[in-house]
Every structure is written in C-alpha cells, then in structure tokens.
Amino acid sequence: MRSIFSKGRRRSPRPTAMHEAGHAVVAWLMAQEEGDEPGFDAVFIDPEGRIGANEQTQESAEAGEVYGRVEGAHFYIPLGFYFPSIHWEGADQPNMANIVRWNHRRMEMQVLMVLAGIAAEARHRHWARVVAILDGGQSDWKHAKKAVSDFVRTEEERDVALDELLSRSSRLIRMPAVWATITSFADALVEHRRIEAEEAAELLRSSYARHGGSPRLAGQILDATGWRCPSCVAGIEVPLEATAA
C-alpha cells in the first residue's frame, strides 16, 4: 500500500482537507478508467498532529501543523518492479513499446492525481502553484518528479513534462463539477476526519453526478497531452533488467 502524505505550515484543517480532497477526487476520476473506484483505501486529516509525531518529528506536530494522507492511491509502478531479470524467448517476448505506452499512461494518472493536491490547495488559498509546492507540497512534487523521470532522458524533458502535467491537473480541478466535488468532499473530511473507501466512493459518485460531471472526463484529460514521452515515441524501454534471449 502506498500513501500520499501531506505536511505544511497549515494551522486550519480546511486547507489540508482541500489538498487531500484534490488528491482523492482526481484518484477517483482516474479509477473510472480502470473500473476500480474509488482509487484509494482511505483519506484522512489529522489536526492533532499524530501523523507528524509518528512520521516526522514531535516538534513539527507541536507546531500546530495539520497533516493529511490518502492511503493506497497508486496507479503506477516502474516496470522494472514487474520484470526483474527475466529472459524472454522467441514468441514469448512482449511488445515492449506497447507495454511502455501503457505504463506511461498509468504514470500520468498517478502524477495528475499527485499534483491535484497542490492545485486544489493553491486555488483554495488563492496562491500561485509554486507557493503551494513550497508550503506543504514538496513531498508531492518529489513524487511526481521521480515518476516522470522514468520516461525522460534529460532534466529539461522532465521539467517540460512536469509543467504540462501540473497545468493539466490544474485545469482538471477547475472544471465546475470537479471543483464542486472537491469542495463537498473537503467538507466531509473536516467533519469526519477520516473517510474509508466505500463511503468515499458513495460520496464522490453522488456529488459528481449532482453537479453534472462527465463520466469520461479523466480519459479526455489523459488524451489531451501536450508533451511526447521520448521513450514511448521511440519505442524504447525505460531501464529494465529484462532482455531478449
């Protein structure tokens, strides 16, 4: 299970709830592409600082920071995780270019979901996105950079991809039905502190439908890419230990 952990200089539960709701709603939208909603195991915020005490430092917790987490939201795993030291033979050799393209799409799903927390908090607080990255979004940004780096050859290519994906994530959370759903889910987080997957899925379905959301929105956002994955276009693999015999 993977978690997206958010920390920052937040003194009120609301900004943290908006941040985590951004992650959760976009994870849910992306999971529609997979038929496996809601796309995470649980979401919670922690105004009392217990996460900070356990996973950061007691000093951070005592500073009054409000932490949050989305548990189990993970669409992308580097392909090397699946294919360690495999030697393919003859017709059993997979079409690696197709596998790369498939995993590239899942990487984009992951990064759009990760960056949605930054984008949602920035909009809620009327901040530039770079401020939201510096104030509580560093972990998300590092996560996104690492995922994108699996599909590029240079830092310049990585930065172009990250900028485009952050812009797409920001456009996604600004769509009226998505923003309304983020806001209502954040309300529920502030009230209940923790929402498990089954309840979250029900809340998200109800809110998104009530606000006229499109069921194909995630696919449209994924298909609207403005950057070209060099590894995918060239038909070459990200570093793997799998080789043809």
Image (tube, grey):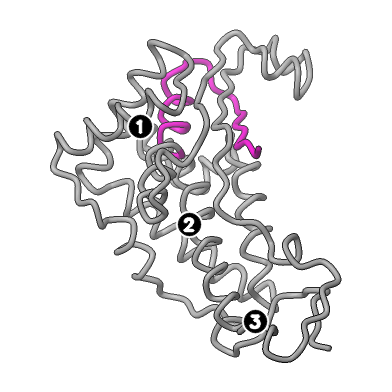
Residue 172 falls inside the magenta stretch:
no
241 sits left or right of 63 in the view: right
Give amino acid for label 2.
Met
Residues at marks 2 and 3, CA–CA distance in whole angstroms: 23 Å
Give amino acid for label 1.
Ala
Return the x and y of residue 99 as percentages of the image width and height: 59, 75
Q: Are marks 2 and 3 in contact (CB under 8 Å)?
A: no
151 sits left or right of 201 in the view: right
Q: Which residue is mark 1?
A: 201
Give amino acid for label 3.
Pro
Instruction: Give residue 155's quadrant in the image.
Output: bottom right
Closer to the observer: label 1 or label 3?
Answer: 3
Q: Label 3: state its secondary structure.
A: loop
Residues at marks 1 and 3, CA–CA distance in whole angstroms: 35 Å
Return the x and y of residue 123 as percentages of the image width and height: 36, 39
Disc on the earlier residue, 1 or 2: 2
Q: Which residue is mark 2?
A: 109
Q: What's the magenta region?
A: 1-23
Of 171 and 196, nearer the camera is: 196
Instruction: Give residue 167's quadrant in the image.
Output: bottom left
